[in-house]
């Protein structure tokens, strides 16, 4: 089983490059599933029902979110109704939407997808992602051995700790949020694929997807500055993970960077 995980979609440039490249990636890697982090898809912050529909039409199977999940108020109804749009599972009980789902591929195989939010340097006071994952695994395991975790977190240490904690319990721990792809993809000792950050899908000639001049000016002056999504050199960043559908163990992970 081959699963593509795509780093944070940033604005219209990210949506357009995904739309152009995803069909070829599906053929090249014989993909069973495409899991895409879409928390920056709407103008660089949040997502709307209309944009979610566009991403599904482009070939995405599951959309995960992160700390910008509530930036667009209209997303709440969408999260409540749509099984394949996930917000972080470690938000408190009663929060709209769901944090994990078991999806079925076109060939009938089942895959558990989990979305979690880190707690270090994040604006939300969420529940412990480590303990949350333990409970979720217990619910998914009777249905499938294949479990992919999108851990949306700021620090490499928290992501690395999650990978080691979940090694042998899930098929993959994939980091998102920092928009800079890391070169540490590997299979951990107990068979879990890991990468600290997938990177982003959007304008590469930028500061993490935003107009570089405005960001630099903000650093120089410490003055408030309205961010704008950049436009130059759109790229798709992510990883393809090969997983044994019977055991749930990852066999291979390949970093992807496509213009």
Image (tube, rainbow, N blue to C red):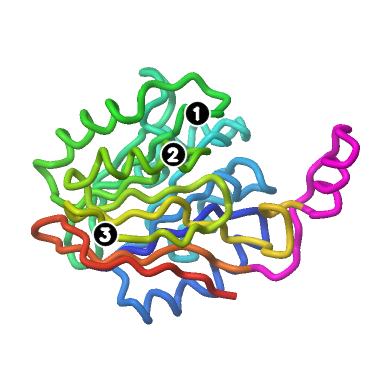
Which residue is rendered at x = 27% and y = 26% of the image?
Answer: 131
Report the quarter where the N terminus lies: bottom left
Q: Is 30 inside the magenta-drawn segment?
A: no
Residue 60 horizontal/vertical position (percent): 43, 60
Which residue is rendered at x = 56% and y = 47% of the image?
Answer: 178
The residue singled out by tag 2 in the image is 157
Disc 3 on helix, strand or loop?
strand
Q: Against 204, is 210 above or below?
A: above
Mark with earlier residue (1, 3) = 1
Q: Residues within 10 Å of mark 3 (few under 14, many from 20)?
A: many
Disc 1 on helix, strand or loop?
loop
Segment colored magenta: 211-234
The residue singled out by tag 3 in the image is 187
Mark with earlier residue (3, 2) = 2
Mark with earlier residue (2, 1) = 1
The residue singled out by tag 1 in the image is 120
**22 sits left or right of 121 in the view:** left
Q: Is 223 inside the magenta-drawn segment?
A: yes
Q: Residues within 10 Å of mark 1 (few under 14, many from 20)?
A: few
Q: Which mark is residue 194?
A: none
Q: Residues within 10 Å of mark 2 (few under 14, many from 20)?
A: few
Residue 167 horizontal/vertical position (percent): 22, 46
Which residue is rendered at x = 60% and y = 68% of the image?
Answer: 235
Give how far apart the Cα atoms at labels 1 and 3 are. 25 Å
In the rendered image, which quarter is residue 128 located in? top left
Give how far apart the Cα atoms at labels 2 and 1 are. 9 Å
In the rendered image, which quarter is residue 90 located in? top left
Residue 207 horizontal/vertical position (percent): 72, 53
Q: Against 121, is 196 above or below?
A: below
Q: Are marks 2 and 1 in contact (CB under 8 Å)?
A: yes
């Amino acid at each position: 089983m081959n699963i593509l995980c795509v780093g944070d979609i940033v604005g219209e440039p990210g949506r357009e490059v995904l739309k152009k490249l995803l069909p070829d990636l599906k053929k090249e890697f014989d993909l069973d599933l495409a899991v895409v982090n879409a928390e920056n898809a709407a103008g660089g912050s949040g997502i709307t029902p209309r944009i979610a529909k566009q991403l599904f039409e482009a070939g995405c199977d599951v959309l995960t979110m992160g700390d910008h999940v509530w930036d667009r108020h209209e997303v709440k109804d969408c999260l409540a109704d749509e099984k394949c749009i996930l917000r972080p599972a470690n938000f408190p009980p009663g929060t709209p939407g769901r944090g994990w789902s078991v999806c079925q591929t076109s060939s009938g195989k089942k895959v558990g997808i989990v979305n979690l939010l880190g707690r270090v340097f994040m604006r939300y006071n969420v529940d412990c992602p480590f303990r949350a994952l333990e409970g979720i695994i217990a619910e998914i395991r009777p249905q499938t051995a294949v479990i992919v975790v999108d851990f949306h977190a700021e620090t490499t240490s928290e992501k690395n700790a999650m990978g080691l904690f979940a090694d042998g319990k899930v098929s993959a721990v994939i980091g998102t949020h920092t928009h800079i792809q890391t070169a540490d993809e590997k299979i951990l000792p107990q068979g879990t694929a890991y990468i600290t950050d997938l990177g982003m899908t959007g304008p590469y000639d930028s500061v993490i997807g935003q107009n570089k001049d405005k960001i630099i000016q903000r650093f120089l002056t410490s003055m408030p500055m309205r961010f704008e999504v950049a436009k130059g050199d759109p790229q798709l960043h992510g990883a393809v993970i090969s997983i044994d559908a019977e055991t749930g163990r990852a066999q291979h992970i390949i970093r992807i960077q496509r213009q």
